[in-house]
Image (cartoon, rainbow, N blue to C red):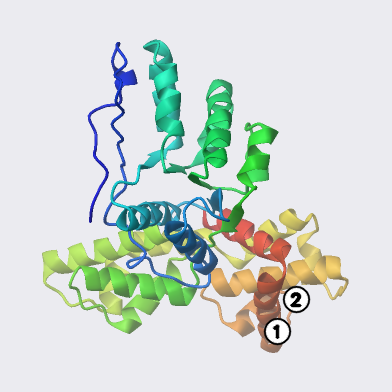
Amino acid sequence: MARTAAPSRPSWDNAAPQPELSYRSNVNPKHTFDNFVEGKSNQLARAAARQVADNPGGAYNPLFLYGGTGLGKTHLLHAVGNGIMARKANAKVVYMHSERFVQDMVKALQNNAIEEFKRYYRSVDALLIDDIQFFANKERSQEEFFHTFNALLEGNQQIILTSDRYPKEINGVEDRLKSRFGWGLTVAIEPPELETRVAILMKKADENDIRLPGEVAFFIAKRLRSNVRELEGALNRVIANANFTGRAITIDFVREALRDLLALQEKLVTIDNIQKTVAEYYKIKVADLLSKRRSRSVARPRQMAMALAKELTNHSLPEIGDAFGGRDHTTVLHACRKIEQLREESHDIKEDFSNLIRTLSS
């Protein structure tokens, strides 16, 4: 795959500015759309990223992707960069972490090369910046990025940003920037659901030429739920242990290889913990969740807590119902289906579910 010419260092790293700019792409060729595992949790984000790769500077400008750590935001940034460069070999695509932008600006100021810094960042075809929340409380960097953002948008040059939270929830960033972050398309990436977690494990094993039995992938995916990195790290440990010991990868072997990780996960997420977290989130009492009250202000949080218990613990539906004031398993099943439906229909419910998953999994 063709790449943009890289990188002698940009000249603001030196004392004397140079007339010609050398673009350091930093796009990782290993991260593509082909090896990104798609599921309900990231389907819209992948589709939007694919559209941007095919039509940079179009309707989705800027594209803002947000979600917790290890959910695939960085992978999609690189996939877009690779997609743009595959269509146009000489495209000037620059990927970076937000802290690199800050460091570059500081060097430019120190070396009296701020005009070249501006020219560099305002002449790219696509600027892909990871973890934009690290601009928080860096007023000079925000000021410069504000003008860079405006210049790129006016030139129909693509901007893609990622963050661990919704734009308006980023503290320490100016309102005028947060407003601009939402001018194009803002898309959440949620923690992967069970089927996607299984698919991620199977694909990772296949890439490593490892035969992973389906029941083993399901066992791991059912117990490790927070993010893709955790899943891949766990699988790497299983593979390494299997290679060292020469043993077959079975459920019993995985229990042994991941003993500490599985114990920690079960300790962290309990039904009691879910109930306390949900009650605090919705500003009600745990006793309300266990009561017979049916008002929406209580019933909806109760359904949310039941759905989270099914998603994040290994308890059966009857056990979950028992923990919620002795309700039967059909009530729990109805609650889970209702929350799943509302996540499709209501942005607020989708946000609540993602926020609670993030809190409980961190």
- Comparing marks 2 and 1, which lies closer to the viewer? 1
Residue 106 visible from this viewpoint: no
> Rounded to the nearest whole Å, what is the CA distance between mark 2 and mark 1?
16 Å
The answer to whether residue 244 is left or right of residue 360 is left
In front of the other: 93 or 32? 93
Snapshot quadrant of residue 215: bottom left
| Numbered label attached to residue 229 | none
Q: Quadrant of the N terminus?
A: bottom left
* Residue drawn at 21 percent across, 78 percent down: 211
* Residue drawn at 23 percent across, 69 percent down: 207
Where is mark 1, residue-wise?
334
x then y, percent, for residue 123: 42, 34
Residue with the most extreme bottom position? 330
In front of the other: 362 or 34? 34
Estimate how packed mark 2 is, as few (under 14), some (14 to 19) or many (20 or more) residues with alpha carbons within 10 Å.
some
x then y, percent, for residue 305: 68, 68
Q: Amino acid at mark 2?
A: Gly
Identify the element where label 1 is drawn: helix
Where is mark 2, residue-wise?
325
In front of the other: 216 or 53? 53
In the displayed structure, 58 sits above or below 169; it is below
x then y, percent, for residue 346: 72, 68
Snapshot quadrant of residue 254: bottom left
Q: Amino acid at mark 1?
A: His
Identify the element where label 2 is drawn: loop
x then y, percent, for residue 301: 75, 66
